[in-house]
Amino acid sequence: VPRHWLASSKPVGELAEALLVSSGSFRVDRKRMIEVLGRFQSADPYTFLLPWLRLAVASGAQRIALKNSTESLELTFDGKPLEERWCKDPFAPLLEGDEENDAEAERHKQLSRGLLALLPLEPDAVAVDSGKVRLRLQPKEAGEPSWLEAGAPTTIRVKLPRAFAARALERAKDAWGLADAQLTIDGRKLPSWEPAPGVGERFEEDRVRGVLYRAEGEAPPVRVYHLGVALDGVDASLPKGVTGRISYDGISLDASQAKPVQDAAFKGAVKSTRKACAELRQAGKLGEGSPVLRAFAYTKGGVYATAAAAVLSFSLLVAGADARPEVAWAAAIVYSATTAGVLLVLGAWFLARLSGRRNPFKA
């Protein structure tokens, strides 16, 4: 089986030991410690982009881009650059603390977690350029990669088979949401908030943010996000028929970084979400209104359908008046009712756009 079809079964410490880190004279010599850390990493190595997306959000990024080219998989983002002292040893943030600046230590841990998850895929090279940071990880026998160019403001490049990169991008696409930054993958913008155009009501309650919406049939479970990335194993039920997405960066994650710790902070976030849900339901903003408007007013197809209905009703009015003038008054009533319905749907769509709903005419 070709190597690029499968992730490596080698221990993480052995993989780390085989890498050369070009910052100073450092060599990965903490094999046993990294081995212990590796036991807590995600079982899916293709999720290595998720910690780096959290890194971008924690850095205050407004624009994040992922691109899979023939040369490398590239992640770029703006915001606060990385600090050189935390990148001389890329695994140091996981092994050491910073009593004076825990937030910075935690931010740089996201870089380390991504590298740790990536190791089983045995990348040909990894390059990180951010501020004064110039970090290179590659097999010791390899020379300086020829595919590198200066990155700005922060660029992380990974040289690995495109099939691996494509799987990693799928994981990132599925997990992304509820962040203020705009993420693009291969030039295509991903929506960060609503699950679909015009669906859901946003809320903010006690630093918990999110979007709630009604779900037809059995409602899917609530998705909880931390620094723009969805978590697994969440128990945050809402009233029947209502689901949503919530984000609270104050919750703690377990050792896998994929699940929230069910502590007081998490329970408080769930309580705030239920409070917001009750208020939105009482205000009639969770779809308890007209099902016709929910189905048509906020979709591209609905707008097209109402315009077609207006043209059809006018055509019938003209044809009916010509064929049987004595029933023209009845055709006029039908036309007036249809026109009123069209105006109602278009008006609801227009008001929704003014209130911040996403434009269905944009991809």
Image (cartoon, grey):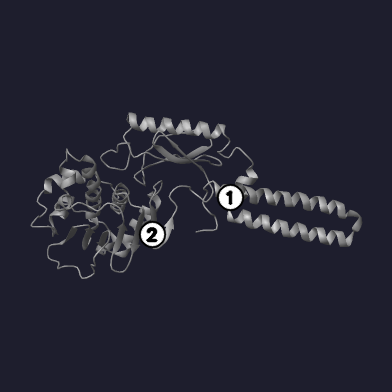
Residue found farthest to the bottom: 146
Residue at the spot 25% in from the left edge and 46% down from the top edge:
107
* Viewer can see residue 39: no
SS label for mark 2:
strand
Residue at image location 18% in from the left, 53% down from the top: 10
Mark 1 is on which residue type?
A: Tyr
Q: Residues within 10 Å of mark 1 (few under 14, many from 20)?
A: many
* Residue position marked by numbered label 2 in the rendering: 185
- Identify the mark nearer the N-term, 2 or 1: 2
Report the quarter where the N terminus lies. Answer: bottom left
- Image-based side of 81 in relation to 14, left or right: right
- Residue 17 picture location, percent across and down: 12, 54
Instruction: Name the residue nearer the viewer: 294 or 357.
Output: 357
Q: Amino acid at mark 2?
A: Ile
**x, y percent for residue 251:** 32, 36
Q: Secondary structure at mark 1?
A: loop
Determine whether 277 is above or below 49 in the image. Answer: above
Residue that label 1 marks: 298
Marks 2 and 1 in Cβ contact (< 8 Å):
no
Residue 138 x/y as whole percent: 17, 61
